[in-house]
Image: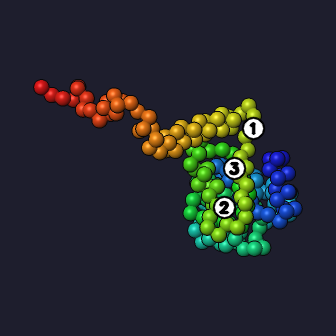
Amino acid sequence: MQRLTEMCEEILEMGERALIFTQFTEMGDILRCHLAETFGCQVLFLHGGVSSKERNRMVELFQDESGPPFFILSLKAGGTGLNLTQANHVFHFDRWWNPAVEDQATDRAFRIGQAKNVQVHKFVVAGTVEERIDEMIERKKDVAGKIVGSGDSWLTELSTTELREIWALRQETVGD
């Protein structure tokens, strides 16, 4: 919380805006109260209990040039389908197990119409479960990159025998 406060102070001084993602509604409430009290400004908080009408109002308010500087969003309610290009900072206050969910949330600021450089900040406290989650996320990204990111080049690296084994009908499936 202390580091987030320091960084939010810098963001305010530079006249910039931030999205802050959390996976817990209770933490979102704590963050909203803390930031509003600390900086004396309106802080929005979008979570699953917010009506679609209120959700739309919050998005419009944040997207306005003079809108509030901080928008807290639960990963589930605010991680997809929103265009929040007024933000040029994205915070993942607590980490989620699935890197794709975090990436989708980050993409709320990386939308068509984004004219600023967006900085992404992920908080991890050393020696805690968060650190283990972070390690697991990095492993998942590494595996996904090797599978998806490898393209078709792996085919050219196979020997003739390996290619035959891939395409051959297995002996145990052939009847008499």
Against 72, residue 113 (above or below) is: below
Q: Which three-letter amino acid code belongs to the residue tagged 1?
A: Val
Hey, which residue is sitting farthest left in the picture? Answer: 176
Colour setting: rainbow
Residue 53 in the image, given as x and y percentages of width and height: 60, 71
First in sequence: mark 3 or mark 1?
Answer: 3
Please give the count of numbered marks on the rendered protein: 3
Residue 171 in the image, given as x and y percentages of width and height: 23, 26
The residue that disc 2 covers is 109
Q: Which three-letter amino acid code belongs to the residue tagged 2?
A: Ala
The residue that disc 3 covers is 92
Closer mark to the observer between disc 3 and disc 2: 2
Residue 175 got which mark? none
Disc 2 to disc 1, C-alpha distance = 25 Å
Q: For this view, does 66 lie left or right of residue 23?
A: right
Report the front residue among 86 and 48: 86
Residue 125 got which mark? 1
Against 85, residue 136 (above or below) is: above
Res. 47 visible in picture: no
Res. 21 visible in picture: yes
